[in-house]
Image (cartoon, grey):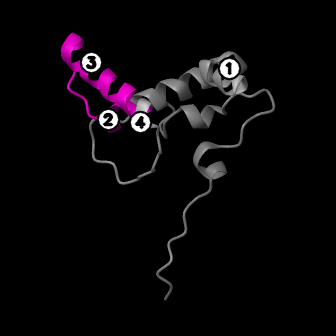
Amino acid sequence: MSRRVTLPGADELFGVRNHDSTVPAQATAGTDGAPRRSSGRVRHDEKITVYVTPDELLDLEHTRLLLRRDHGLAVDRGRLIREAVWLALEDTAERGPDSALVQRLLER
C-alpha cells in the first residue's frame, strides 16, 4: 500500500477561470451556496509557505502592531495574511480585471 498522498491541483481547488477573468460562482461561494468568508480563528490543517523580504516582514509586523494599538485587534500574522488573501480574492471575484490584485500584478 502506497503511503503517498494525492493532493488536488490548483484547478480543482480554485476552479477554472472564465475567459473574462472572473472567478466562477462556485469558487466564491461555500458548499451551501452562501458567500464564502475568511476562516478567522479556527484550527487550520492546510499549510503554505510564503517567502517575504525583510522589509515586507517588518511592514507585516508593523501592521499587526498597529491593529493592536489603534483598534484593539490582537491578531497573529497568519490571521492577518488569511484576511488579506480573502479580501484580495473577494475583490477579484467581484471586480475581475478592475480589481486591485489584477491591477497590481499587471504593473509588475
Q: CA distance from mark 3 to mark 2?
A: 11 Å
Which quarter of the figure has residue 37?
A: top left
71 lies left or right of 96:
left
The mark lying in front, picked from 3 and 4, is 4
| Residue 104 in the image, given as x and y percentages of width and height | 64, 22
State the residue position of label 4. 54
Q: Is residue 49 above or below residue 69?
A: below
User: Hey, what amino acid is under mark 1?
Assistant: Gln
SS for dot 1: helix
- Give whichever of discs 4 and 1 has the lower sequence position: 4
State the residue position of label 3. 67
Q: Are marks 3 and 2 in contact (CB under 8 Å)?
A: no
Q: CA distance from mark 2 to mark 4?
A: 14 Å
SS for dot 4: helix
- Give whichever of discs 3 and 2 has the lower sequence position: 3
Q: Which mark is residue 77?
A: 2
Viewer-side residue, 13 vs 61 = 61
User: Hey, what amino acid is under mark 2?
Assistant: Arg
